[in-house]
Amino acid sequence: MNKSAHSLAVGGLLAMASAVGIGRFVYTPILPPMVEALHLSKSQAGLIASANFIGYLAGALLAAVKLPGTHRAWLLIAMAANVLCLGAMGLTTDMAGFLALRAVAGFASAFGLIFASALVLNRLQASGHGTLSAVHFAGVGTGIAAASALVAWLAFHGGDWRDMWFASAALALAASIAVAILVPPDARTAVAPAGPKTRLSRGFWFLLVAYGLFGFGYIITATFIVQMVRGSPQIAALEPYIFILFGLSAAPSVAFWTWLARRSTILRTFALACATEAVGVAASALFLSPATVILTSVFVGGTFMGLTALGLLGAREGGGDPRGRIALMTASFSFGQILGPLFAGHVYDLTNSLAVPSLAAAAALLIAAALSLRRPT
């Protein structure tokens, strides 16, 4: 296997780990100490999460228009902005500041995901090493696991929520420096208008809607699972480990789901993954115990990046510059993610339980599975 292809795949892994795994998801393990120290309500916690996804949506839409410079330049700019936003979260206690920083971080995460995927996946495909795309997508789970372990270590040693944000920023910075080294410049990848150049098929539209439902379906668990564990005395001891398990389940899952897709179809595999994730989401809602919360962590962690990868790989099938289709998919995904924490936070404050939001999320995932199985006419 070509050494430069390996380096490129590792660069993609680290880009996804920094911009998405740390930039977006470190909020989940940091949320419980933030809630405790700042006396945040679940509605406020959900609002901060949704601000990140609103920024993510804006970034996805802007990434689809003509921009000067190269894919690599925008990737590195996005990663730098992500590091700054992570560090700045530890410098404020103001709700407006949290919302602004998480919105900008979400914008940077979308740019990071879209430009890293367009750059790395295209180069791997062109060099005949497309199978290494699984390494690229494994970066999100790797980032989640690494950041969660760092947060757990700091909590064990008496670090507060500010220390957790500062340390996460340092971890993201280290990954960003490595990306700058591993992903070389390429003058041929100038950013051009990325609007779709071919007619979008009905299969793509089904996948687009299903992708948005998937965003709603997974994000409630991904945002609140650590808070759920902390608030349940019978499973509170699992708090330091549950999101690490979530990330470790995500890292190798992409290889499995893309392997399965090559032996079936993207839509069928997407449907199976959605149904599997629905089981995991529903498990914690129906009966909260050590066994069910571990099942939830493994089933949701083990599918959400597989589903993300399947959606983005499916969006690339139309030929031409895939950035427009990737941006549409990311926008649909973002709408689901924005609604999820807002809905869950309000219902949580009313009922003091995540059962109803989790069951609604499981239903959304089952609808997404059904849409994926619908054949275009």
Image (cartoon, rainbow, N blue to C red):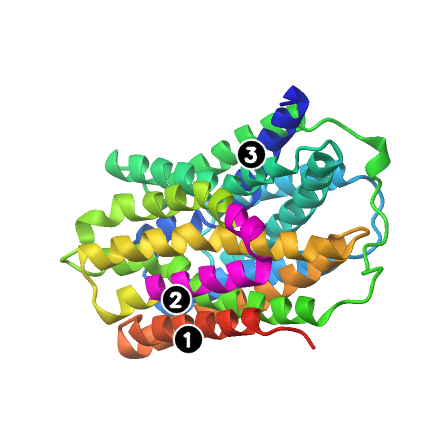
**Which of the two marks, 2 or 3, is nearer to us in this view?**
2
Q: Is residue 18 above or below residue 279?
A: above
User: Element under label 2?
Assistant: helix
Q: Which residue is drawn at 83% across and 49% down?
A: 67
Where's residue 220, x and y in %?
41, 64
Secondary element at image label 3: helix
How busy is the neighbourhood of tag 2: few (under 14 within 10 Å), some, or many (20 plus)? Answer: many
The prevailing secondary structure element of the residues shown in magenta is helix
On the image, numbered disc 1 is attached to which residue? Answer: 363
**Horizontal placement of 321 versus 345: left or right?**
right
The answer to whether residue 63 is visible is no
Determine whether, in the image, residue 328 is placed left or right of residue 19: right
Residues at circles 3 and 1 in contact by the CB criterion of under 8 Å: no
Residue range corresponding to the magenta coloring: 258-281
Residue nearest the observer in this picture, 367 or 172 = 367
The C terminus is located in which quarter? bottom right
At which x and y percent is residue 353?
Answer: 27, 72
Residue at mark 2 to residue at mark 3: CA–CA distance: 29 Å
Which amino acid, by three-letter code, is at mark 2?
Ala
On screen, residue 25 versus residue 8, left or right, reads: left
**Is residue 162 within the magenta segment?**
no
Is-magenta flag for residue 265? yes
Q: Which amino acid does label 1 sit on?
A: Ala
The tag earlier along the polypeptide, 3 or 1, is 3
Query: Based on the displayed image, in which of its 4 quarters is residue 83 positioned?
Result: top right
The residue beneath circle 3 is: 14
Q: Name the residue type under label 3.
A: Leu
- Whether the residues at callouts 1 and 2 have beta carbons within 8 Å, the answer is yes
